[in-house]
Amino acid sequence: MSQEKSFVPANGYLMLFVELIILVVGGFAVKTGSVLLGVISAIVFIFLLGGFLVVNPNGSAVMTLFGKYTGTVKNNGFYWVNPFYSRFKISLKARNFDSDRVKVNDKIGNPILISVILVWQVKDTYRAAFDVDDYNAFVNVQCDAAVRKLAGLYPYDNLEDHEAQITLRSGVNEVNHALEAELSERLKIAGINVIEARIGYLAYASEIAGAMLRRQQASAVVAARTKIVEGAVGMVEMALEKLSDDKNVKLSEEQKARMVGNLMVVLCSDKEATPVVSTGNEH
């Protein structure tokens, strides 16, 4: 497999000076009546004019001669090359790509919407120019393929897959690292260096978004209630222990049970308790 190699062109300012000399010679020939010399000077002038090349900063020019790769000019400046050389300019600047939101299924089959943000740049101009048909389109297609593969490896969250340690929603660092590695491997064939890759958008698809939101809310309510009950039980146990230590207070088992019930209602209720004052003995 061929690789990128450097090409050293001629100084453009020197050739511009040569062009001026040819122009002066041609004008002098016409003036003195030497038509043949003037025509030859004009032909040479026009031919050499097609060899001037400007390479901007963070730019490059891939050179081919009759279909054969001869090298790449990466140093910015004003140059001159053989006019028969074909030149294919490739930018070496870092570029952003924000993919479209695609609908895919996660590991457990839930439809989700996901997109990827990619920062990339051309590293090997030979591969970008000759190993793929269009490296820009290649980046777009491979990003789509990579994000579809990634979504199928992880669940959206662990509400259904409780054993999942990494999910698309919570394992941001791990998922982005896996995405970057996958894209680097895919885009290497085009000579492209992946600077950064991360998930730009992630959500359930519209047809299940409402149901999933209600499920998350229910899970949050259950978790909150569980925490409240655990705390209430602890407080009731502490109250009974304190009362047992106080020798001046004697409670029967029935009174303890009633007190436990009242305390649990007060502590676990989501509304303010209304106290009832007992004014006499119950019969």
Image: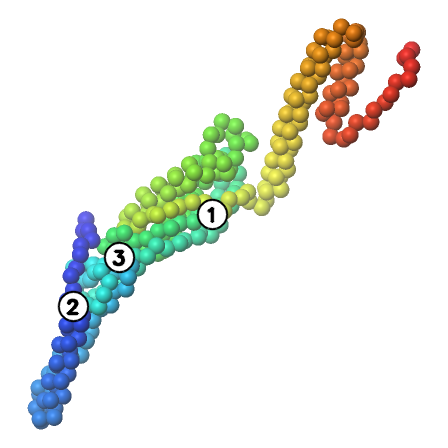
Percent of width and height locating residue 158 = 52, 32
- Disc number for residue 156: none
Q: Residues within 10 Å of mark 3 (few under 14, many from 20)?
A: some
Find numbered disc 3 in the image and state the secondary structure of the residue it sits on.
helix
Mark 1 surroundings within 10 Å by alpha-carbon count, few (fewer than 14), some (14 through 19), many (20 or more): some
Q: Nearer the viewer, mark 1 or mark 3?
A: 1
Q: Is residue 149 above or below residue 63?
A: above
Q: Nearer the viewer, residue 141 or 119?
A: 119
- Camera-side mark, 3 or 2: 2
Q: Which residue is mark 1?
A: 200
Q: Pinpoint residue 72: horizontal percent, then vertical percent.
A: 20, 59
User: What residue appears at the point 12 percent right and 81 percent down from the top-left corner?
Assistant: 21
In the displayed structure, would residue 55 be above or below residue 128? below
In-image side of 61 versus 143 (left or right): left
In the depicted view, which residue is nearer to us: 134 or 165? 165
- 148 relative position to 186: left or right: right
**In the rendered structure, which amino acid carries the disc numbered 2?**
Asn
Residue occupying image coordinates x 62% and y 31% = 219
User: Which quarter of the picture shows residue 147?
Assistant: top left
Q: Quadrant of residue 146?
A: top left
Question: Which type of secondary structure does the marked residue at label 2 adopt?
Answer: strand
Count of numbered circles on the image: 3
Point out residue 180 in the picture as x, y percentages from the top left corner: 37, 43
Mark 2 lies on residue:
11
Tell me the CA gap for discs 3 and 2. 25 Å
Residue 129, which numbered label? 3
Above or below, comparing residue 239 to residue 152 in the picture = above
